[in-house]
Image (spheres, helix red, strand yellow):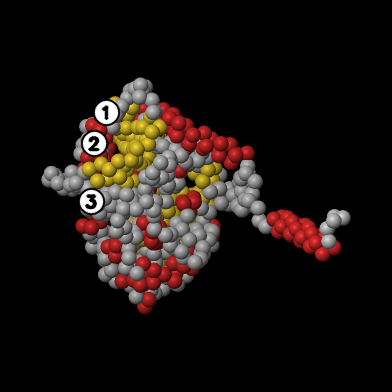
Amino acid sequence: MRNISSHSRAIILRTVFLALLFSIFSQLAFAQAPQPAPKTPAEIERAQHDKQLADYILAHYDKTEIQIPMRDGVKLFTSIYAPKDHSRAYPILLSRTPYSVAPYGSEYKKSIGPSELFARDGYIVVYQDVRGRMMSEGEFVEMRPYIPNKTSKQFDEASDAYDTIDYLVKKIPHNNGRVGTWGISYPGFYTAMSIIDAHPALKAASPQAPIADWFIGDDFHHNGAMFLPHMFLFEATFGLPRPEPTKTFGPRFQAGTPDGYSFFLTAEPLSNVDEKYYKHNIKFWDEYIHHPNYDQYWQSRNTLPHLKDIKPATLIVGGWFDAEDLYGEVHSYESANRQSPQGDVKIVMGPWCHGCWSRGAGDHLGYIWFGSKTSEYYQKNIELPFFAHYLKDAPDPKLPEATVFETGSNQWRKYDAWPPRQSAESALYLHANGKLSFLAPAASEGFDEYVSDPAKPVPFYSETTLTMAQPYMLDDQRHASRRTDVLVYQTDILDHDVTFAGPLKPSLFVSTSGTDSDFDVKIVDVYPDNTPDVDDNPKNIKLGGYQQLVRGEPFRGRFRNSYEHPEAFEPNQQTKLEFLMPDVNHTFRKGHRIMVQIQSSWFPLTDLNPQTFVPNIYDAKPSDFQKATERVYHTPEAPSRIIFRMLK
């Protein structure tokens, strides 16, 4: 710096000093800022695997986008992934969805087909935006009703599937003339519709968690009770109007809090929802609240009566812990099997949440572990061989009528019927002092009672959540059993395994001091106090004495005699109430106990019953919400019990 002036030298030194100071502070800030957790070896391996799969699809498949015309002239946006290798013909796999075929344009999906196994096995994989959704033309109708004996221009989802398949087999090069359909949840509904009046080229279909009846047991209603967070949050985005084709979804609803219990308590009564939140912008909500009973609006959306004379081989798939469409899975199988006696209809039920058979290992849910990678087993040994056999003449996997995972014992079971012929009807009876027994009451024991307060409803989940929270299906019920507004009955410690296999039917004798009430029933597996905790347990959940929900279901008491014609209760008058709960296949192990819990709110999983009868429950005013004293009777004349099928 000999030739630099003293002034310039000072500027340079100050600049160097400031740069050094900035570097020090930047490093300190970086060190103090929260850093993303380093990826585990398993996460790194999964990321590498996913990239390899995406690269394989990009290298081996051509993607095209077309508009397929329907019989009424409306065109449906369709995305096609076809193998680049033209040396042989391939079957077509079709999935019709209201949730978007994205990505649009030149970008590719990272995985195609029902599971990642299909990309390397060679199929023409087709995705379609259904009528009125995303990039397809036409008007969208929620669970569009099926039309029997259609005229030439009439359409429904069955005809849209037929027209799509007809176009594909005639127009897509290098296809072998065979088509399979699949889909989960709403796409499962569209898959079920494809097997009604099926196109001759449709050889195999797999409706997975298919919506079947939106009033009795799927998604938004269970036995007439609204599944509030699921309905509210889903429709807040999905139900927004789409004035013209679009590639993007509407904005997600912002509740401003993660506490669903608090948020939905302030949202009640539901007559205020439109003014406070939806602003009359959600068409389906308006329709929903104006059809509080099982009228023609809901009955026309019931797919079960139409699952008859099924020609394609059909594999119905679901999960025992599916919080959304457990009803549709089992009842679609029962209806299709009964109404198509010559058909090839099978069912698979695993220990899965909604759609979990298509992603992840399936080795656990919440804090309950299943002892094996059940999803991978299903994909490799059931799903892929099923489609390969019917679409490619691969060896017959000889699947049994029912392949079901038995929770509790954590074993796959194969049966020639569901429920198993090896099961027989049995019952567990409620007794005084919280006893639960296989013996009916022998003396006049009386009743148990509790006060149900709509202002302080029983929470459905032990953790804070805004959503329906899929793990609630096997959540610890100790938070509920300790409340005074929950009745608890349990067996002595079991001296042998007891296996439930099939539907459950509460048969209760009840009364209420109000004129309406819900009665929610839960079947619970009580673990021994010395049960060790699992290793992967960041929240330090204690499994000693864990009360695992096996099955829970609400029932809106006004529908005890008819879902179409609700009736008020006569205050304090004993009445019988029976309803079906979804099927289970669960073993209560030796050393465990079987528990039954009964309550009159399950919040916010279900909306609040005001406990005052009003013709349309969604018009209830704040003054209609009243405390009520609920009684459950257990006498020889009124033997409240849970009827189930026990495996011999």
Residue at image x 46%, y 67%? 263
Which residue does the image show at 41% across and 37% down from the upper left? 112
Considering the image in quadrants, where does the C terminus appear? top left
Q: Residue 182: image x %, image y %?
A: 34, 39
Instruction: Characterize the local packing of mark 2: few (<14), some (14-19) or many (20 or more) Cα atoms within 10 angstroms.
Output: some
> Disc 3 marks which residue?
145
User: In this figure, which residue is indicated by the disc labeled 1?
Assistant: 177
**Three-letter amino acid code at the position of disc 1:** Gly
Q: CA distance from mark 2 to mark 1?
A: 11 Å
Badge 1: residue crowd in 10 Å (few <14, some 14–19, many ≥20): many
SS under mark 3: loop
Q: Tell me if 545 is positioned left or right of 108 in this view.
A: right
For marks 2 and 1 on the same chain, the one whose residue lies earlier in the sequence: 2
What residue do we see at 32% from left, 24% from top?
89
Q: Along the polypeptide, which appears first: circle 2 or circle 3?
A: 3
Q: Which badge, 1 or 3, is on the more N-terminal residue?
A: 3
21 with respect to 238 (left or right)? right
Rendered location of residue 514, percent (x, y): 35, 72
As rendered, which of 202 and 333 lies closer to the eye? 202
Q: Which is more foreground, mark 2 or mark 3?
A: 2
Which of labels 1 and 3 is toward the front?
1
SS assignment at label 2: helix
User: Marks 1 and 3, Cα distance to the nearest angstrom?
Assistant: 29 Å
Q: Quadrant of residue 616?
A: bottom left
The residue beneath circle 2 is: 167
Judge whether 106 appears above or below 141 on screen: above
Q: Furthest-front residue in view?
A: 3
Task: Tell me if I can see residue 567 in this picture.
Answer: yes
Of 603 and 179, nearer the camera is: 179
